[in-house]
Image (tube, rainbow, N blue to C red):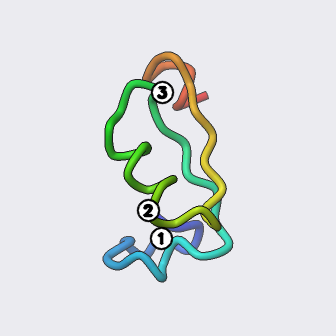
Amino acid sequence: MRDDGEEITKLQDLQGKTLPGIKADYALTVLKEHYPELKILEYDSIGECAE
C-alpha cells in the first residue's frame, strides 16, 4: 500500500518510494537489475522488514 492508502498496481506507483524486502527474495534482485532508480531496503526477515 502507498502512504495515501491506494494500492500499488504499476511500477510507476513506486517512483520516489522506498521498497522494503527480504534479502533472499528473487523479486528484489530483478527489480534492482531492471529499475536501479528504486530505493530498496533489504532485511533478513519479515519481522525486521515490518519494523
Q: Amino acid at mark 2?
A: Met
Q: Are marks 2 and 1 in contact (CB under 8 Å)?
A: yes
Q: Which amino acid is tagged 1? A: Gly
As displayed, is residue 29 above or below residue 31? Answer: above
Query: Could you tell me residue 41's position as x and y percent?
Result: 63, 40
Identify the mark nearer the N-term, 1 or 3: 1
Comparing labels 1 and 3, the label whose residue is closer to the camera? 3
For the N terminus, which image quadrant? bottom left
Report the residue at 59% width, 76% height from top.
15
Q: Is 5 situated above or below 20?
A: below
Q: CA distance from mark 1 to mark 3?
A: 26 Å
Q: Residues within 10 Å of mark 3 (few under 14, many from 20)?
A: some
Residue found at x 32% / y 38% = 26
Q: Amino acid at mark 3?
A: Lys
Task: Tell which tag, 2 or 1, sits nearer the viewer.
Answer: 2
Q: Which residue is mark 1?
A: 5
Near mark 1 (Cα within 10 A), the count class, few <14, some 14-19 or many ≥20, is: few
Q: Position of residue 31 (x, y in %)?
A: 43, 56
Mark 2 or mark 3: whose residue is earlier in sequence = 2
Q: Secondary structure at mark 3?
A: loop
Q: Which type of secondary structure does the marked residue at label 1 adopt?
A: loop
Which residue is denoted by mark 3 in the rendering? 23
Picture residue at 46% right of the left edge, 17% below the top: 45
Circle 2 is placed at which residue position? Answer: 1
